[in-house]
Image (cartoon, grey):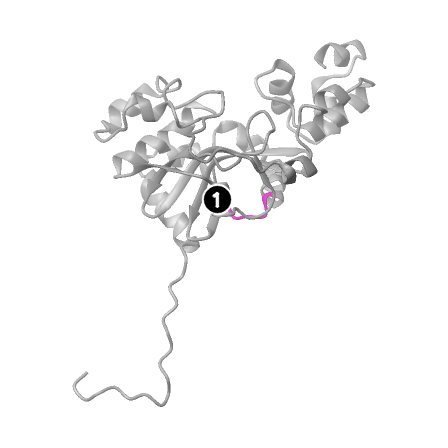
């Protein structure tokens, strides 16, 4: 893709503008740091005069998703890629400052995927505040809107995944939503009693793509809560998380008493 763009003397800035994505994102696609979303790859190929059908064949279409029901439910799945265990070396100054005491064993860290070193700091904060590990199937909880997919584009299925269980929230790291051949990956997908919320951990790059992020959030069809780098590194992340998520907690409905019923005296 990059070679073809340079052959046509098209700058990265120009192609990113035509695709309506930040140049930094296009750079990651071209370098292989991130996999091309099918809809963007198809559009880029059309703009640059390249064939793309072979690439799109590796993605599962909507009908194939609907037909694929033979999922093993007893397994614990982890998509290939970076995990808490492989990214634990970053932000050493922060870990020294916070002096975390309650952290999960390495076996658990290997089951929690992460996109950047910044993502794993909230994980450490959750466990330090008393979180535990749960193994649950996201699909079995009937998530709203869209299909959920693995990194290779296959449906997520009923297999269990490691989740951070914190104050009645189940938090699954790095979950892919498949929106009609477009994939959106959520840093932490939260669930509690039928309520779904996407949590995003935003590094400095997101300061340059505010509009792009908001358009992306709207396509998810569920609430999105974003935490900036300063909030994540503040040492007060748990308090900020509780405050942001409080409005999404399921409301308890008190049964209404009958107007004809009277309380006994002294009650």
State how many labels appear: 1
Q: Is residue 69 visible?
A: yes
In the image, is residue 17 above or below residue 267? above
Quadrant, the N terminus = top right
224 left or right of 66 in image: left
Question: Can you give x and y, in whole percent of width and height, for residue 171 in the image?
Answer: 41, 39
Q: Residue at x 81, y 24 (%)?
A: 46
Residue beneath disc 1: 140
Q: Quadrant of residue 216?
A: top right
Q: In the figure, residue 250 lies in which quadrant?
A: bottom left
Q: Nearer the viewer, residue 92 or 50?
A: 50
| Residue 121 falls within the magenta-colored stretch | no
Q: Position of residue 47 (x, y in %)?
A: 80, 23
Dominant secondary-structure state across the stretch colored magenta: loop
Q: Does residue 235 appear in this view?
A: no
- Position in image of residue 242 (x %, y %): 35, 47
In the image, residue 129 sits, relative to residue 205, either above or below, namely below
Residue 75 location, x and y as percent?
43, 30
Query: In the figure, is residue 96 to the left or right of 3?
Result: left
Where disc 1 sits, the SS reads helix
In this orientation, which residue lies closer to the viewer: 223 or 110? Answer: 110
Is 222 included in the stretch rendered in magenta? yes
Report the magenta residues as a range: 220-224
Q: Nearer the viewer, residue 15 or 34?
A: 34
Circle 1 Cα neighbour tier, 10 Å, few/some/many (<14 / 14–19 / ≥20):
few
């Amino acid at each position: 893709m990059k070679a073809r763009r340079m052959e046509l003397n098209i700058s990265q800035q120009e192609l990113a503008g035509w695709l309506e994505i930040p140049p930094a994102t296009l750079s990651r696609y071209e370098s292989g740091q991130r996999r091309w979303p099918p809809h963007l790859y198809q559009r880029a190929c059309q703009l640059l005069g390249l064939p793309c059908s072979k690439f799109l064949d590796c993605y599962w279409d909507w009908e194939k998703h609907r037909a694929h029901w033979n999922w093993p439910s007893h397994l614990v799945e982890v998509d290939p890629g970076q995990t808490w265990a492989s990214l634990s070396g970053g932000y050493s100054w922060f870990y020294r400052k916070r002096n975390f005491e309650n952290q999960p064993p390495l076996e658990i860290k290997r089951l929690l995927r992460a996109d950047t070193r910044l993502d794993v700091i909230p994980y450490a904060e959750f466990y330090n505040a008393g979180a535990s590990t749960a193994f649950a199937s996201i699909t079995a909880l009937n998530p709203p809107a869209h299909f959920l997919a693995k990194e290779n584009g296959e449906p997520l299925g009923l297999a269990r995944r490691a989740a951070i269980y914190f104050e009645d929230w189940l938090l699954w790291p790095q979950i892919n939503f498949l929106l009609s051949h477009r994939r959106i990956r959520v840093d932490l997908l939260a669930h509690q009693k039928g309520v779904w919320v996407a949590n995003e951990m935003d590094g400095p790059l997101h300061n340059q793509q505010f509009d792009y992020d908001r358009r992306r959030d709207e396509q998810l069809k569920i609430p999105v809560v974003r935490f900036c780098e300063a909030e994540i590194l503040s040492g007060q992340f748990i308090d900020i998380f509780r405050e942001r998520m409080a409005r999404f907690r399921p409301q308890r409905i008190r049964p209404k008493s009958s107007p004809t019923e009277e309380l006994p005296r002294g009650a």
